[in-house]
Image (tube, grey):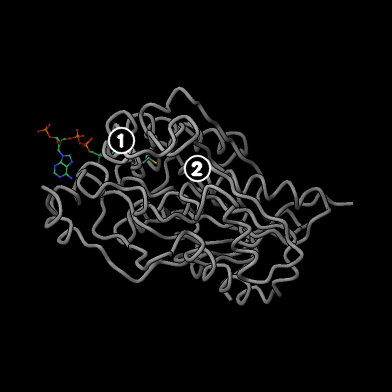
Amino acid sequence: MSKITAAITGVSGYAPEYVLTNKELETMVETNDEWITSRTGIKERRILKGEGKGTSHIAVPAVRDLLKKTNTKPEEIDLLICATTTPDMVFPATANLITAEIGAVNAFGYDLQAACSGFLYAVATGSRFIESGQYKKVVVVGADKMSSIIDYTDRTTCIIFGDGGGAVMLEPNTEGYGVLDQVLKSDGSGAPFLHMKAGGSRKPATIDTIQAREHYAYQEGQTVFKFAVKNMADVSAEVMERNNLSSDDVAWLVPHQANKRIIEATANRMGVTSDKVMLNIHKYGNTTSGTIPLCLWEYESQLKKGDNIILAAFGGGFTWGAIYVKWAYDPK
Ligand SMILES: CC(C)(COP(=O)(O)OP(=O)(O)OC[C@H]1O[C@@H](n2cnc3c(N)ncnc32)[C@H](O)[C@@H]1OP(=O)(O)O)[C@@H](O)C(=O)NCCC(=O)NCCS
């Protein structure tokens, strides 16, 4: 019997309506459009507004659209993995809230937390379920409501992040398409440079933690930048070497959208020209688990069956990785 691989058979995305521009940020913190654009490549990001709305309110419309596009009934889904750093609640898993909302009554679901590499880890994990032969339809969601953990008085972080997400469908393939290889890494010694100080079991919420603004993302930008540039480029080059892919063989690089300069450094190291690099950071900023599916969604109409695609990410933890995918379908 031919080997089963996990093919991506559909992709969808969801960007909340509200647009937070650099101009509006100028009214909130001491910054300016020129600084943000030249240092990060970001012009605007989306914010999920509305009382009681969480990450599942980004994921649900994305998954509903995915089901429509792939002609799938909710009850056909076997498993839904939600990569997120901003779950609706500490428990239950956001994946469970999503499956309940869409009526995926036969699916089990769980969340996966790997910061900005979450979507990559979840695609790698979901693929194993497909390869086992036991599961036929696995939905992988990457979504974050970063605005829920961003301090809008801290100009070094609030300019970077935004809300958004997307989803892919994984299904078995025996013709060699889909997720073919991955290099995934993590190093917990990077935790001090990008983390949230309170709200976990080490330091539950108190009036003091709130007053000390410890429920927001804390980042040492320059250190994160240095590790991101080196590590994202290293794993992307490694996955190419392992699969004997030259830069000409690579149709697309799909990089995590954290900073345009990090993306350029990765592309340079791979020898991939800018026309092959998916880029939408100017529109959405860093949506953490959402960046890669949002890119695939926006570029879907340009992807052709057989395209060699490298997904690459770096995030808090530290976590990082690259995945080699052979695209399974032509534009529909
Ligand atoms: C955060 C980041 C954009 C900052 O850019 P940078 O070039 O490293 O800037 P620095 O931190 O060196 O700061 C340079 C100066 O700009 C200032 N500055 C910082 N944020 C600013 C802002 N929003 N507007 C204007 N000035 C700002 C700093 O205070 C500093 O001023 P000083 O020289 O007078 O002290 C950059 O470090 C970065 O992108 N890091 C990686 C972040 C990331 O990818 N995170 C997610 C990981 S998945």
Could you tell me which secondary element the residue under label 2 belongs to? helix
User: Residue at the location (45% across, 60% down)?
Assistant: 54
Q: Which residue is mark 1?
A: 208
- Vertical placement of residue 171 versus 64, above or below: above
**Image location of residue 149, percent across then percent down:** 36, 48
Residue nearest the observer in this picture, 179 or 62? 62
User: Residue at the location (31% across, 45% down)?
Assistant: 259
Q: Residue furthest right?
A: 1
Q: Give the side of residue 192 with respect to residue 155, left or right.
A: right
Q: Give the side of residue 66 with respect to residue 290, left or right.
A: right
- Vertical placement of residue 186 versus 253, above or below: above
**Image location of residue 287, percent across then percent down:** 40, 53
Identify which amino acid the numbered label 1 is placed on. Asp
Mark 1 is surrounded, within 10 Å at the Cα level, by few (under 14), some (14 to 19) or many (20 or more) other residues, namely: few
Q: Give the side of residue 20 with respect to residue 201, left or right.
A: left
User: Residue at the location (75% across, 69% down)?
Assistant: 76
Number of numbered tags placed on the structure image: 2
User: Residue at the location (14% across, 47% down)?
Assistant: 35
**Image location of residue 308, percent across then percent down:** 57, 52
Tell me, for residue 117, which label it has, or none.
2
Residue 56 appears in view: yes
| Ligand 1 positioned in quadrant | top left
Gap in Å between the C-alphas at discs 1 and 2? 31 Å
Answer with the quarter of the image where residue 262 lies: top left
Mark 2 is surrounded, within 10 Å at the Cα level, by few (under 14), some (14 to 19) or many (20 or more) other residues, namely: many
Q: Are marks 1 and 2 in contact (CB under 8 Å)?
A: no
Quadrant the C terminus occupies: bottom right
Answer with the quarter of the image where residue 203 lies: top left
